[in-house]
Amino acid sequence: MATENGDSLVGRKEEEVVGKVQKLSTSEGSGPANIDPELATKADEWKEIANIKFKEKHFAEAIDCYTKAIEINPSVAVYYGNRSFAHLKLENYGFALNDASKALELDKTYIKGYYRRASANMALGKFKLALRDFESVKKSRPKDRDAQIKYTECAKIVHQQGFARAIAVESEKPVSLTLDLSTMSVDHSYDGPKLESDITIDFMKDLLVWFKNQKLLHTKYAYKIILMAKDVFSACPSLVDVTIPDKNKFTICGDIHGQYYDLYNIFELNGIPSMENPYLFNGDFVDRGSFSVEVILTLFGFKVLYPNHFYMSRGNHESITMNQMYGFEGEVKKKYNGKMADLFTEVFNWLPLAHVIDNKVLVMHGGLFSTDDVTLDDLRKID
Ligand SMILES: [Mn+2]
């Protein structure tokens, strides 16, 4: 599901809607809609600046400018709609949802509001709510192909989920327990890295080059790495304490998002992981990029090789709903199969949420908490 496909920020349709909103608000003349024309112009100028920031992909700045427009004139649906889109880009789905709902409250005919709210709901895994919005778009624009496509995509997921629930009883067993690697054979024609016993540094070095040449690791060995990683992570607490030995450097990396060549370059520039060169990868390993499989197998491999010197924490993309929407699930199914995609989901659920380095630095992918009194021990208690 592409949140932003063919969905330009300021298209012709949107201008029409803006016109309509302004017309509506002057004819109805209710509440804050009776705004001084000079102020209305000023607000619109902020919106224009915001749109430029948006096009330049400066989403946080765009949000600030839309907010200024809203502060001056809170009665224009499109300001909220556009700010919602910027929030979607930053994956602030809760804020995106609020803004889209506000836009629709101001103008029920504002089509993009339905799109934005549906996209936010889909990202939050609320597919039935999303479907309702896509349905509204489809009804009011029966000839719109884009609306038709999005409705169909979303309806498919709702249907699949219903089906999955119906058969869930049969398959409650974790995927990891249903696999028998001994029955998987490796053909003689396979000339890539082989993993018959433990992971070694030589295997990892071969794997790095093999992936760099865009070759696929054999299914059996891919499964093997994932299962070994599962054993390591399932023994980890939710909050992991890390101690850095004296004078050693410690490298923390943010979102890799399936960019295998970026990962490869990090290791070239900063050194391959080892006990002397420890790393923490702070979530969002997969989705968006085309080489998520290569990235995650490499990272899992190093985790198994150096469990106490190579760390990984869970990002918001290490979850099934994100993987369904942002490409990882599709990539795994294309390169391997659906069962492996399910196995990844199982292992992602075991990833630690946060790390404390030398009792001083707290590192996590998610933001801080809605209340101020959360302690490290509270994090430790999360199962
Ligand atoms: Mn990310």
Image (cartoon, helix red, strand yellow):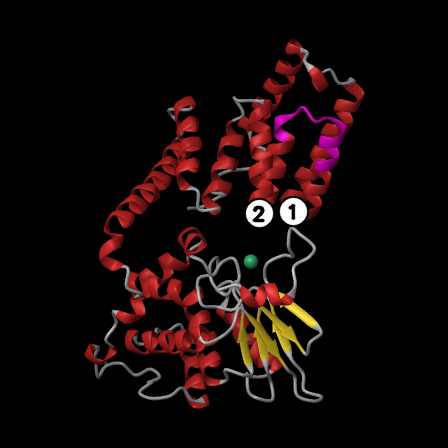
The residue closer to the viewer here, 250 or 314, is: 314
Which kind of residue does numbered mark 2 sit on?
A: Lys
The residue closer to the viewer here, 381 or 359, is: 381
Q: Is residue 232 visible?
A: yes
- Above or below for 287 versus 19: below
Identify which residue is drawn at 26% across, 46% down: 163
Which kind of residue does numbered mark 1 sit on?
A: Phe
Evaluate if marks 1 and 2 touch, with contact meaning CB atoms under 8 Å apart. Answer: yes
Rendered image quadrant of residue 94: top right
The residue closer to the viewer here, 357 or 74, is: 357
- Above or below for 48 versus 37: below
Q: Secondary structure at mark 2?
A: helix
Left or right: where does residue 31 sit relative to residue 171?
right
Left or right: where does residue 96 sit relative to residue 235?
right
- Above or below for 186 versus 60: below
State the extent of the magenta-drawn residues as a range.
67-78
Question: Which label number is shown at residue 205?
Answer: none
Q: Residues within 10 Å of mark 1 (few under 14, many from 20)?
A: many
User: Which x, y percent locates residue 58?
Assistant: 67, 48
Question: Which label number is shown at residue 59?
Answer: 1
Q: Is 76 in the magenta?
A: yes
Chain-order first, disc 1 or disc 2: 1
Instruction: Indicate the quadrant of ligand 1 in the picture.
Output: bottom right
Identify which residue is drawn at 60% across, 89% down: 276
* Residue holding disc 2: 89
Q: From mark 1 to mark 2, how far is it between C-alphas?
A: 7 Å
User: Which x, y percent locates residue 150?
Assistant: 40, 38
Q: Is 332 in the magenta?
A: no
Is the C-beta of the residue carrying label 1 under 8 Å from the nearest atom of ligand 1? no
